[in-house]
Image (cartoon, rainbow, N blue to C red):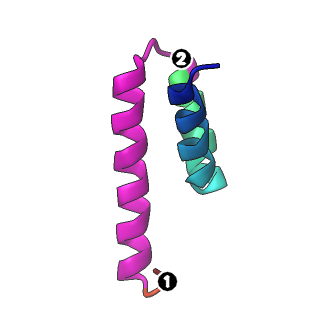
């Protein structure tokens, strides 16, 4: 396994379970490149952080 694949797995595991599950379902139905997946993961993580901050949980 390449280092970049380990990074992807680490990034996926940082997401909330529900978000991770939905993302994996989405990705399973499409062909997504590594760079695009990394961008999507960062966008998801950023969105989750923002919502937690707005809710006072961050």
- Give the secondary structure at mark 1: loop
Q: Is residue 36 left or right of residue 26?
A: left
Q: Quadrant of the N terminus?
A: top right
Q: Residues within 10 Å of mark 2 (few under 14, many from 20)?
A: few
Q: Nearer the viewer, residue 2 or 32?
A: 2
Cα distance in 3D space between marks 2 and 1: 33 Å
> Residue drawn at (34%, 48%), measured in percent from left and top?
43
Q: Earlier in the sequence, mark 2 or mark 1?
A: 2
> Residue drawn at (55%, 28%), measured in percent from left and top?
3
Most frequent secondary structure within the magenta stretch: helix
Question: Which residue of the protein is positioned furthest toward the bottom in this rendering?
Answer: 56
Q: Position of residue 28 (x, y in %)?
A: 58, 20
Q: Which residues are magenta?
A: 28-55
Q: Nearer the viewer, residue 52 or 4?
A: 4
Find residue 25 and name its label. Answer: none
Find residue 57 and name its label. Answer: 1
Label 2 belongs to which residue? 29
Q: Residues within 10 Å of mark 1 (few under 14, many from 20)?
A: few
Question: Which residue of the protein is positioned furthest toward the top in this rendering?
Answer: 31
């Amino acid at each position: 396994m390449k280092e970049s694949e380990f990074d992807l797995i680490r990034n996926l595991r940082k997401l909330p379970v529900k978000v991770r599950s939905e993302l994996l379902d989405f990705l399973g139905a499409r062909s997504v490149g590594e760079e695009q997946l990394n961008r999507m993961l960062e966008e998801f993580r950023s969105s989750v952080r923002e919502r937690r901050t707005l809710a006072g949980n961050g």
